[in-house]
Every structure is written in structure tokens, then in C-alpha cells.
Image (cartoon, helix red, strand yellow):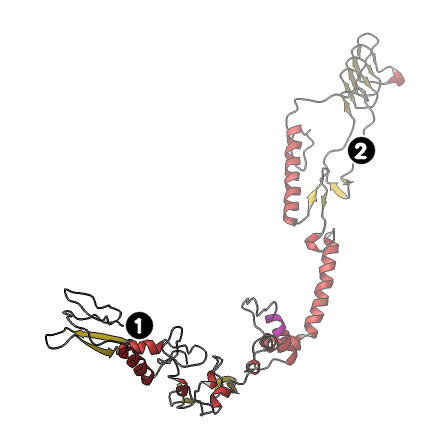
Amino acid sequence: MALGTETVAGVENGNQEAVAMGYRAKAVADKTLALGFDAVANNENSVALGSNAETRAFTQVDGTKAINGLKYKEFSGIADGVVSVGKTAHEKQIINVAPGKISQESTDAINGSQLYAATIVLGNVATSVKDNLGGNAAIDENGNITFTDIGGTGKDTIQEAIAFNKGNIETNTANINGNRTAIATKADKNADNLSVDDVNAWTTKLNDEADLATPKGKLVTDTQVKAALDTKLETSDIKSSDKTVGITTAAGNVDLRVNLDNTSLTKNGNGVIGIKDGGVTTAKIADGNVTKAKLADEVTTILDKVGTGAIETANHNTVTGDVVKTYVDGKVATINTEVTNLGDTVNTLGDTITHVGKTSKETVKADNGSGINVVTTPATNEKGAIFTLSLDEDEVKALAGTTNLDTTYLKTDGSNV
């Protein structure tokens, strides 16, 4: 049956049971349907549905199909014809298709949502596989899972990584088996059974970075200690260049002592050093320095030089009692004793007899620092004034103490010895 302008149905080759509907629609094979503008059904038991739809021979698919090395099999259904909704360059989408039954026997069409669900599941499987493999495992855009440097082996495939580790395991196993005795021996090591090599190895390790100059809590060797001590002061380094101090060493101790000759210098039982009687003389200390040689010389004693001073200006030497008496007697001899009418007492040292309502023929005075005291007894009707002269002991001592013995003579207080 043909319905439409230039429509053909069952004409060629005497085909039967053909239906063509639409402008230039053609159903030219047995049991065919061509529906629509330029729709053509050329193959038996086929349908050309819609404008420009065109059929072709079906492809029979057996129960097994290999894709990318995977076999898909046990498909249901046997092809007997085709249904076409377009042709090359005029393809059409089949839309609004309900989900088809998914089962081993189903021959229903599968819609997009069902395919999407399947791809989500496959994606999850691929991701979980990658994550479980870990390391540098990755999935490319085509779903391929790849590896690099698996487990730090430098290998990019599981087989290579396993082979690499297998070789290491075998080698290490052989080493362990061959060193069982050594391992057992090392496990039994303690301070009592260490070998020389063990001691050297431990010493080197424990001594690493040890430094006596900047301690770090490390162990040091006797070599390091000796090197440090070699730069320190030894007992043999302690010396007395002028021999005045004696030095002895015993058991690492140093004993220092002053050399005594028991002639000039002595030492008592408590170790106190003193000067022996007669051991110090002026000649021995003439230049101000007391030495053993000077103290040992037989020279005139310092006491022989005491009392050689004179009572005169700029003379600071000590004087004897005879010198003082002679000086005082000379002063007294110059005093005119014919002094009368004195009613007052003359003050000591340096005072001048003054007129106090009476007349004195003479004035008696003593120089400051001379060590002479002058006492005046007032005149009476029977006789004139009496002048009594005496030595001031303290001033005489002071006078004698200022004699010049800084470099040659000894002071009375011995302060310059």
C-alpha cells in the first residue's frame, strides 16, 4: 500500500506486504514500512520511521563480544530486522524513552538515566581502586589507571615493583641466613665481652663532636685530655729565677719556701720569719734593699751609726744625750742670771720673758723644737729671778726620731728597716 505523492510500496521485484506513506516514501522489501518524507525501507522486516529515515541490513551479534580485551557475553535476543529513524548525516535522537528492564533476559531499550547510573558506579570503582592502590596511582580521562615509582621502588608497574622487592627479600634473606651467628653474637654483647673493634667503634661514636673547650656532654678520650693538659701549667714550670724561694714537687704538689741561712733571717715553729739579732747592719741595707748577701756580710751594725747627728738646721740625724747636754749647757751659759723684779713665770719653749709691772735685766727664751723647757721663779727682796732649764723628753725623742735614715741610717722606731 502506497499513500502519498511519488510514494512506492511493494512494486520492485514483486515485493508484498509493504506500506509506504508520505511524499516520496518507499517500502520496497517484504514486510516493510516507510513512514515520512523520503523515508525508505530497503530491508526485509524493517521500518523506516520519519523523514529521511533509511534502513540497512541488520548485524547479527552472537552471545559473546570482546572489547578492550574484555569479553561481554550471554546477550539475549536474535536480530530479524531494523528500525531506522534517520540516515547518515540525518541522524535523530530517540527521546522520551522509558527505562528498559535490566536483566539477563531483557531486550528493552535502555535510556540515558540508566546509562548514567552505570557510569557513576564504574567511576566509583575506578576511584576506589586508585585510592586503595595509593602512592602515585592515577586515573586518566579514558579511565586508565597508571602508576609511577610504586612504593619508592622506582618501578611503574605492580609486577616490576613486586619483582624488585622479591629480589631484595631474597638477597636479604640470604644475608640474614649467612649472618645468623654474627647476629646472635651481637645480640649477646655487653661490656664484658666487647671486642677491640667493638670498643673502638663505640668510642668513636660516643666521642663524636666532643670538645673540651666547649663541652657538649659527650665522652672524651684520654688523648683529648692529655692534649688539653699539655697546654696547661706544669709543676716543672714553676721556678725561682733568683733562688730566693725554694721550690720542691712531690706527688704533683708544689711546695714553696723562702731560703733562710739562719744568720740574718730565721723562722720559728709557726713558720714566722724574723731578723736574727745582729743580722741587720747599716752597710747591709745601705742602698735601701735588704738582701741575703747584705745581711750575711760582716759590717758595722746600724746601732753604731745612731747618735752621729748634730743639733743644727737641716740636720736630721739622731743625736746622743751628750750632744744634747752640750747644746743645752751652751745655751745656759749665755743667760745672764742677774735678772730681777720678775713677778711672773716664763712660759715654756719659745716664749720671751715680758715686762709685767717690773723690770728684768735679761730675757730668757728657748727656740721652738729645741727640746728645752724654761721655768722662771719670780724675784724676791733677797735675790733676783731664777731661771730653771730642763729637757722636754717627748720633744727630744721627736727630735731624734726625725733624723735622716731613709737610705743610710735606722730610725728610732725602726720604720725604715
Depth check: give the residue in front, 175 or 355. Answer: 355
Q: Which residue is mark 2?
A: 60
Question: Residue 29: horizontal and vertical position, in percent?
Answer: 84, 20
Badge 1: residue crowd in 10 Å (few <14, some 14–19, many ≥20): few
Between residues 256 and 215, which one lies in front from this camera angle?
256
> Which tag is nearer the camera, tag 1 or tag 2?
1
Residue 84 in the image, given as x and y percentages of width and height: 77, 22
Seen from the viewer's position, the closer of residues 284 and 38 is 284
Label 1 amino acid?
Gly
Amino acid, disc 2:
Gln
Judge whether 157 appears above or below 315 on screen.
above
Q: Is residue 154 left or right of residue 124?
A: right
Residue 295 seen: yes
Q: Looking at the figure, which quarter contains the C terminus?
A: bottom left
Residue at horizontal 44 percent and vertical 85 percent from the top:
282
Determine the residue positioned at 45% across, 80% down. 408
- Tell me which label, 1 or 2, sits earlier in the chain: 2
Q: Which secondary structure type mostly characterizes the magenta part of the structure?
A: helix
Residue 287, compared with residue 29, is above or below; it is: below
Quadrant holding the N terminus: top right
Name which quarter of the figure residue 372 lies in.
bottom left
**Residue 101 seen anywhere in this rendered image of the structure:** no
Q: According to the image, label 1 marks what residue?
A: 369
Which region shows up in magenta? 203-207
- Disc 1 and disc 2: Cα gap in Å? 160 Å
Asked whether 204 falls inside the magenta stretch, the response is yes
Camera-side residue of 23 and 277: 277
Residue lying at the far top in this picture: please name it: 5
Which residue appears at 32% of the width and 76% of the height? 398
